[in-house]
């Protein structure tokens, strides 16, 4: 049992947010590292060397970490964070989500366009439904999220279109397996940054069943 009374699986890594001091699964946090130049850099892929500094994937919380100089405390040495750090995180996460969706598409496990997505939903093939933030609410309301699946409204039509190799897209669907669990994790982080529905922490049970 982890803090907060949640059941904890053996492979569910947790970290402490330097702002809220809450311990939670890494899926809801963004990793930062201190560069040799003394600057703080976001590490959304979690591959950069160095001691990780973790902050909840929330724009206001990241901005608070910058304003209060909490990265220096987390790094245990002087650390300078750019004022636009939250913007950098937002851009990096959006790019990562777009790239991952593109890879899922190339594997044949993703479609876009109202009719194709509607067909996948009707056939039970859709594990994740994406709908652009700037799409028509009337049009988006005609589609549904199947039970046990995830919905995200954290990408613009231009971003979603880029993932599918076109100028813009309003609706997109991903099948199960492959990279879909990773898309869920990263999209949840981006949704948290952009305060969009679908940004609930991508807990292990969500990613495992994808």
Image (cartoon, helix red, strand yellow):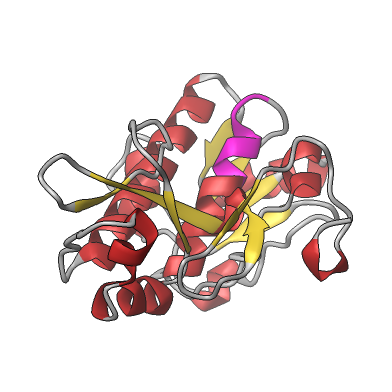
Q: x, y percentage for residue 13?
A: 67, 43
**Closer to the camera in the image, 47 or 164:** 47
**Closer to the camera in the image, 145 or 11:** 11
On the picture, is 208 further left or further right than 153? right
**Closer to the camera in the image, 13 or 137:** 13
For the C terminus, which image quadrant?
top right
Total labels: the figure holds 0
On the picture, is 123 further left or further right than 162? right
Q: Quick one: which residue is furthest to the top in this view?
A: 107
- In this picture, which residue range is highlighted in magenta? 178-184
Q: Give the residue at x 50% y 28%.
A: 105
For the N terminus, which image quadrant?
bottom right
Residue 138 visible: yes
Q: Quick one: which residue is furthest to the front in this view?
A: 76
On the picture, is 102 further left or further right than 4? left
On the picture, is 82 further left or further right than 139? left
Q: x, y percentage for residue 127?
A: 72, 43
Residue 85 counted in the magenta span: no
In the figure, 72 relative to 100: above or below?
A: below
Q: x, y percentage for residue 90?
A: 33, 59
Q: x, y percentage for residue 119?
A: 70, 43
Q: Give the residue at x 43% y 32%.
A: 102
Q: Main secondary structure of the magenta part?
A: helix
Residue 181 counted in the magenta span: yes
Residue 168 visible: no
> Which picture quadrant has residue 3?
bottom right
Q: Give the residue at x 23% y 63%.
A: 85
């Amino acid at each position: 049992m982890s803090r907060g009374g949640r059941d904890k699986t053996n492979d569910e890594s947790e970290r402490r947010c330097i702002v809220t001091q809450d311990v939670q699964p890494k899926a809801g946090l963004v990793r930062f590292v201190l560069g040799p130049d003394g600057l703080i850099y976001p590490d959304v892929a979690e591959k950069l060397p160095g001691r990780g500094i973790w902050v909840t994937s929330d724009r206001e919380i990241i901005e608070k970490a910058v304003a209060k100089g909490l990265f220096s405390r987390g790094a245990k040495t002087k650390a300078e964070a750019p004022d636009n750090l939250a913007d950098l995180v937002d851009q990096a996460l959006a790019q990562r989500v777009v790239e991952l969706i593109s890879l899922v598409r190339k594997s044949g496990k993703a479609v876009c366009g109202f009719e194709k997505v509607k067909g996948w939903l009707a056939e039970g093939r859709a594990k994740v439904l994406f709908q652009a933030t700037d799409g028509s609410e009337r049009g988006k309301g005609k589609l549904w999220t199947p039970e046990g699946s995830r919905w995200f409204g954290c990408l613009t039509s231009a971003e979603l279109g880029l993932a599918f190799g076109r100028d813009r897209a309003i609706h997109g669907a991903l099948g199960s397996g492959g990279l879909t669990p990773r898309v869920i994790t990263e999209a949840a982080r981006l949704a948290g940054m952009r305060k969009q529905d679908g940004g609930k922490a991508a807990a292990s049970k969500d990613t495992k069943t994808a």
